[in-house]
Image (cartoon, grey):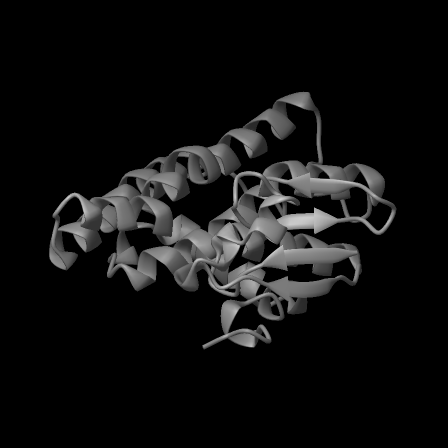
Amino acid sequence: MKLHGYFRSSASYRVRIALNLKGLSADHLPHHLRKGEQRDPAYLAINPQGLVPTLQDGGGATLTQSLAIIEWLDETHPEPPLLPGDPLQRAKIRAFAQVIACDTHPVQNLKVLARLRELGHGDATVTEWAAWANREGLAACEALIAHESGPFCFGVSPTLADLCLVPQLANARRFGVDLAAYPRLLRAEAAAKNLAAFADAAPERQPDAE
């Protein structure tokens, strides 16, 4: 398999964790987002959105969008399950993941922040926008799992929720968010970071890290 990504991309980070948890290897092909390499015609032929990650499975299939990739990995390599439990539990896990992947991350990613700067907003305003988006999303996530057993987001094993949470907390720290208000999320993060699958997927451990 080949994983097209970028060391600091939280969406790519999610997929790296999933691959590690499944014990799967992939060649990592970096595309420097700040240099616009994701808009190279050769890459756009693979992923028309010009986003990362993209996973090529080695058999001719090309997959985009991190949550779709992770669910495909979970269906084709079911152990350990990233969406365990009954239908209700799986729906709760997906909902938590989507708060981050659909409603929080997209409005504070590089593309949106660059557009805000193009519209004339200064760095301080842009950073506060990103911090606000993170605070809003993380507050919802804290409430969603406040009464879930731990130490992970949903029980004693990592799920899709944790794969989304850990990269998003890294984003929040970059934008100066005070995470003390989210003790349940920090508890889940600590449990996750004790696992090699999460630690080895961290941005600073990637070949293209700067």
Question: Can you say which quadrant of the picture contains the C terminus?
Answer: bottom left
Looking at the image, the residue that sits furthest to the front is 41
Q: Quadrant of residue 143?
A: top left
Height in image: 29 above or below 120? Answer: below
**Which of these two is toward me, 164 or 87?**
164
Can you give x and y, in whole percent of width and height, for residue 49 in the image? 53, 39
- As rendered, which of 183 and 78 lies closer to the eye? 78
> Residue 9 at what x, y percent from top left?
48, 57
- Side of 10 where 85 appears, left or right: right
Residue 91 percent location from the top left of the image: 59, 25
Residue at left 65%, top 36%? 68
Q: Residue furthest right?
A: 59
Query: Camera-side residue: 146 or 170?
Result: 170
Looking at the image, which residue is at 12% across and 57% down?
124
Name the residue at 35% across, 35% down. Answer: 140
Image quadrant for the N terminus?
Answer: bottom right
Can residue 7 be seen at all in this image of the molecule? yes
**Please, is residue 30 above or below residue 149 in the view?**
below
Disc tally is 0
Q: Position of residue 53 (x, y in %)?
A: 59, 50
On screen, residue 151 versus residue 105, left or right, reads right
**Image height check: is 86 above or below 139?**
above
Q: Is residue 109 visible?
A: no
Left or right of residue 126: residue 191: right
Q: Residue at x 16, y 58 (%)?
A: 123
Query: Could you say which quadrant of the image residue 89 lies in?
Result: top right
Relative horizontal placement of residue 29, taking residue 97 as reference (left or right)? right
